[in-house]
């Protein structure tokens, strides 16, 4: 079986690894560099904490389990590669108002019902875990399962593993259209570097997936949702967990009408502190935006006043692949045979990548899936209504 | 003796009167002249290195001298990440190395 | 803050731009991060440390004094020193006023009818084994310490690299009392002769000061300083500071020849391999860059992004007189001066001749393609993050990555506090030739830095609302 994957972000890379290791002949077509877009422009949080019970949490739980096994598997597959910095450091969601606190406790309760470890902490317990959190906090929940990975390195490692299993990764290769047989089935792609044959085509083009689908004659509503991050200069490691403000959950679930801000703080292995982030649907405009940085900074200082003096040396932005119902599309196009999607993971594509790859590979091979795949189908009602 | 201030008596620019200043670097007094940067004071007193790198622990001092390379970062009066070559020194400034152990007990 | 013309950078180009703009009646704000004007070229002692005669350190000190006095005495021109431009966005030019790397500095947003970018350039230093030892400086850094601090970086010093700028640096060191035991120009004699002596009439016909400066410095040094061409410092030795260097004879591609290397005892080394323009603000403004990675400008010094102009070294390395001419044109046009103005015509004429000359200097001192043969796997290439040449080789080989972002994250090169200003061009060059396919893909470079100078989180936290939106 020959599969063409469009896009060498983390989703394309994870799919390529899983498929090529099941004996599928895989070629990734990437218009720029591998990992040159969203997957190298965000954070590497692998979170359960920000997800309410439902299909996304199921996929996240499934994926997190796969992530835990990846470092050892990758070591077998590609040997001595730069560390992907997988670390189950746990997350701490902090509420600073009574309202947030009530919402947080409720969410944690529901998550516990779905098997997530979520422990309500007192102020003292919280400050013991993270002494720099604002003492004016009201409540916090500790999520020990929350983990992280360095997303760019992880994607390169997945690609290296795919290559080792026979996959090809063609960069500088822009997909321009599809080739069809008489029945209308997709049998290949046209690119700036010639035509390619395929039994199946997978669109994993991140925030460009909607645009690419249209170009190929398919239907997919996935577009960009911009996000800025700030990076401090290196300092002594001072934040042990991922620390979020409770507003994070609301922003992640919001429908993106206006600009949203939610604080995420973490110390990285390199000594910098990553400070996120904003969410807004404004197309692919990457120009500087001081007001967005200011809003991110203001929230961060409120959550962790000790960071007030930290020097910010860089700001960067990326475009989350936004799907209207906040669920990725993993499965076949609703009309066009041979055309598949693995796209629309919004702010969770790093976390959800391994599960996405397993699901899609099983669907392509007609094999049973480990978790239900219907909620991610392009035919699901929540997409029909939104469209 | 490696780096040093040009001796005023033999300096062709014919320096006028200057105001001496004293700062402390990791607890030790270092004197200089008002108008010098922190890097200027330290280099003028033959202090060549005042930071160690994060990964390999190598010694660093000034390199580009114009605020570009960030090699000369120091903590000044409790504030980290100050480019020593860009900050004018003031008498009493307390300079502490970044990435180094805390200063020794006062002797 | 709404001047007619905002000028960023108060070196020769920015000073000339501010003067020209004001002379045709515009209100001007001139910003510089330093606490005095003059830029790198006219770096001097601050007012708090007066000296009778700084002209001995400067080739054209009187031009500077005249320029400075006119601008500082000009009621239409607001000279704002200690002004750190943090970013440019759709709302305007965002500036912090106060100490370098300070806290709680005053915030200003400038929204000018026209902006002249005159942010200049800084010395490039190629990696050399041992170049991270204390006692190694960039050539410009050593000169800045000599002129601006009256600090001598060593007793026995070598100056190495390429370009006419090495000579005035050696002269400055000599005036600070250092003994310059050698100046090593890596370009081979054949190439220097071909480009310096080609079309000698251009030499004579231009009012060029680059050549004049070199000749002046040469005259100063000839007697006392051995000047060597086709040679380079290819290793620097010492435990915790420099004690000696290896000097090698190079072939025309800058590969050290097997024979002809020697060791010289020194206590300081000054490296200068050309200049890197400070492009971040121009990029943030949306200005297009040329293939040589300078800001592209038209005959009026306009960049591709309205209302931004550019002048001086960010448009090409050409010396002080070219910078003055470009600044004069940019300031005049930015202030909507008359097109038939006499001074404007003079400036255009000067620029024309000087640009041709600058092109020749560039060619004479182009970096040799095989400089990396003097690196060892343990040589630091990214000083901030302690990334070695061996690290770059390893990540490139293991990942087969062709994208700069991946290679940066895999190696951490370019991700330190200088944000690739020092290592960027070298790291890109080293990775480029090793990438599968022989080039990096995706078109990203290390020049894009939306935050152009670090800002404290607490300062940024007050920047949530723009005061007024531009229409
Ligand atoms: C600020 C920010 C923070 C984030 N934080 C997290 C986090 O903490 N945890 C988490 O799990 N997720 C996070 N994300 C989200 C995550 O980064 C994305 O969900 C994920 O990277 C999407 O991966 P992708 O492979 O779908 O897309 P991409 O990485 O964008 O890859 C798509 C690729 O397709 C290529 N392409 C597009 N069109 C074509 C064409 N026509 N032909 C060929 N190639 C084409 C593109 O060049 C690109 O390389 C964050 C995102 C942002 C912006
Ligand atoms: S030298 Fe590489 S980031 Fe500073």
Image (spheres, coloured by chain):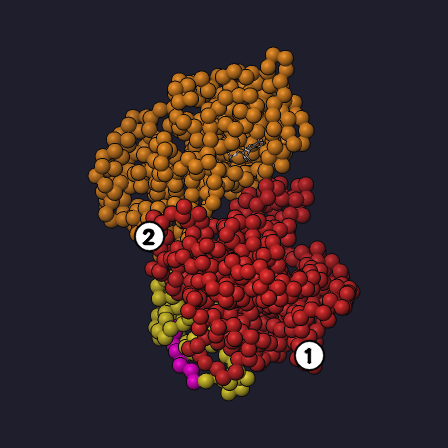
Q: Which residue appears at 44% of the width and 26% of the height?
A: A328
Q: Position of residue A246 (x, y in %)?
A: 30, 38
Q: Position of residue C306 (x, y in %)?
A: 51, 50
Question: Which chain appears red?
Answer: C
Furthest residue in direction bottom, as rendered:
B9
Q: Earlier in the sequence, mark 2 or mark 1?
A: 1
Instruction: Name the residue tied to disc 2.
Output: C462
Position of residue C218 relative to residue B98, above or below, is below
Which region shows up in magenta? B17-24
The numbered mark at residue C219 is 1
Quadrant where the C terminus of chain B sits is bottom left
Give the distance between the C-alpha atoms of the residues marked 2 and 1, in whole angstroms: 55 Å
Q: Secondary structure at mark 2?
A: loop
Q: Chain of mark 1?
A: C
Shade representing chain B:
yellow
Q: Decide if residue C349 is on the left or right side of residue A361.
A: right
């Amino acid at each position: 079986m020959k599969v063409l994957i469009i896009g060498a972000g983390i989703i394309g890379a994870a799919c390529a690894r899983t498929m090529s290791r099941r004996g599928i002949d895989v070629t990734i077509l990437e218009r720029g560099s591998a990992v040159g877009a969203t997957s190298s422009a965000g954070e590497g949080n692998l979170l359960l904490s920000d997800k309410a019970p439902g299909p996304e949490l199921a996929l996240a739980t499934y994926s997190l389990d796969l992530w835990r096994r990846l470092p050892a598997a990758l070591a077998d597959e590609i040997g001595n590669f730069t560390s992907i910095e997988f670390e189950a450091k746990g997350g701490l969601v902090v509420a600073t108002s009574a309202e947030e606190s009530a919402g947080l406790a409720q969410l944690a309760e529901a998550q516990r019902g779905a098997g997530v470890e979520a422990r309500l902490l007192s102020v003292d317990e919280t400050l013991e875990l993270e002494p720099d959190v604002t003492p004016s906090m009201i409540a916090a929940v500790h999520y020990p399962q929350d983990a992280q990975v360095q997303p760019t390195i992880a994607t390169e490692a997945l690609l290296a593993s795919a290559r080792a299993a026979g996959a090809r990764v063609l960069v500088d290769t822009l997909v321009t259209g599809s080739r069809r047989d008489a029945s209308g089935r997709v049998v290949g792609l046209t690119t700036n570097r010639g035509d390619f044959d395929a039994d199946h085509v997978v669109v994993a083009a991140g925030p460009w997936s909607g645009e690419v689908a249209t170009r190929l004659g398919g239907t997919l509503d996935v577009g960009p949702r911009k996000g800025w991050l700030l990076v401090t200069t290196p300092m002594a490691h001072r934040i042990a967990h991922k620390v979020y403000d409770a507003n994070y959950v609301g922003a992640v679930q919001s429908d993106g009408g206006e600009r949203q801000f939610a604080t995420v703080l973490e110390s990285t292995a390199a000594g910098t502190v990553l400070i996120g982030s904003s969410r807004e649907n404004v197309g692919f405009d990457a120009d500087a935006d001081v007001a967005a940085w200011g809003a991110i900074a203001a929230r961060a200082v409120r959550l962790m006043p000790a960071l007030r003096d930290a020097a910010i040396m860089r700001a960067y932005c990326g475009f989350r692949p936004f799907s209207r119902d906040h669920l990725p599309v993993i499965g076949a196009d609703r009309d066009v045979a041979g055309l598949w999607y693995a796209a629309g993971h919004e702010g969770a594509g790093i976390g959800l990548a391994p599960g996405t790859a397993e699901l899609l590979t099983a669907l392509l091979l007609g094999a049973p899936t480990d978790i239900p795949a219907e909620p991610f189908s392009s035919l699901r009602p929540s997409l029909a209504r939104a469209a | 003796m490696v780096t040093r201030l040009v001796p005023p008596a033999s300096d062709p620019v014919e320096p006028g009167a200057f105001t001496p200043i004293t700062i402390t670097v990791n607890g030790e007094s270092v004197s200089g002249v008002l108008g010098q940067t922190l890097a200027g004071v330290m280099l003028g007193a033959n202090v060549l290195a005042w930071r160690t790198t994060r990964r390999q622990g190598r010694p660093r001092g000034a390199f580009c001298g114009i605020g570009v390379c960030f090699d000369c970062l120091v903590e000044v009066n409790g504030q980290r990440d100050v480019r020593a070559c860009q900050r004018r020194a003031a008498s009493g400034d307390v300079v502490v190395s970044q990435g180094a152990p805390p200063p020794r007990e006062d002797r | 803050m709404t001047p007619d013309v905002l000028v960023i950078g108060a070196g020769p180009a920015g000073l000339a731009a501010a003067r020209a703009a004001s002379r045709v009646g515009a209100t001007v704000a001139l910003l510089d991060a330093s606490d005095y004007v003059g830029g790198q070229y006219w770096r001097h002692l601050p007012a708090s440390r007066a000296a009778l005669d700084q002209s001995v350190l400067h080739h054209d000190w009187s031009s500077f004094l005249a320029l400075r006095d006119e601008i500082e005495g000009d009621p239409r021109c607001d000279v704002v020193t200690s002004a750190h431009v943090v970013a440019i966005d759709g709302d305007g030019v965002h500036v912090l006023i106060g100490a370098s790397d300070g806290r709680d500095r005053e915030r200003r947003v400038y929204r000018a009818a026209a902006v002249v970018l005159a942010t200049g350039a800084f010395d490039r230093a190629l990696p050399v084994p041992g170049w991270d030892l204390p006692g190694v400086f960039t050539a410009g850094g050593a000169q800045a310490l000599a002129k601006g601090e009256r600090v001598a970086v060593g007793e026995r010093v070598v100056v190495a690299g390429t370009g006419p700028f090495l000579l005035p640096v050696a002269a400055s060191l000599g005036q600070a009392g250092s003994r310059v035991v050698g100046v090593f120009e890596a370009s081979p004699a054949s190439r220097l002769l071909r480009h310096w002596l080609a079309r000698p009439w251009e030499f004579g016909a231009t009012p060029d000061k680059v050549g004049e400066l070199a000749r002046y410095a040469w005259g100063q040094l000839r007697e006392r300083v051995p000047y060597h061409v086709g040679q380079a410092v290819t290793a620097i030795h010492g435990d915790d500071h420099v004690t000696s260097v290896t000097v090698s004879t190079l072939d025309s591609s800058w590969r050290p020849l097997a024979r002809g290397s020697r060791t010289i005892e020194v206590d300081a080394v000054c490296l200068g391999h050309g200049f890197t323009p400070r492009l971040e603000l121009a990029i943030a403004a949306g200005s297009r860059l040329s293939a040589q990675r300078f800001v592209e400008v038209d005959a009026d010094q306009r960049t591709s992004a309205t209302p931004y102009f550019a002048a001086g070294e960010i448009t090409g390395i050409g010396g002080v007189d070219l910078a003055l001419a470009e600044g004069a044109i940019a300031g005049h046009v930015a202030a909507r001066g008359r097109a038939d103005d006499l001074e404007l015509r003079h400036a255009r004429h000067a620029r024309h001749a000087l640009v041709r000359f600058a092109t020749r200097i560039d060619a004479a001192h182009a970096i040799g393609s095989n400089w990396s043969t003097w690196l060892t796997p343990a040589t630091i290439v990214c000083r901030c993050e302690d990334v070695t040449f061996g690290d770059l080789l390893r990540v490139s080989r293991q990942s087969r990555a062709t994208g700069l972002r991946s290679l940066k994250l895999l190696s951490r090169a370019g991700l330190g506090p200088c944000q690739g200003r020092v290592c960027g061009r070298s790291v890109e060059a080293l990775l480029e030739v090793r990438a599968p396919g022989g080039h990096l893909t995706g078109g990203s470079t290390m020049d894009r830095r939306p935050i152009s100078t670090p800002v404290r989180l607490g300062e940024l936290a007050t920047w949530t609302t723009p005061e007024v939106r531009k229409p």
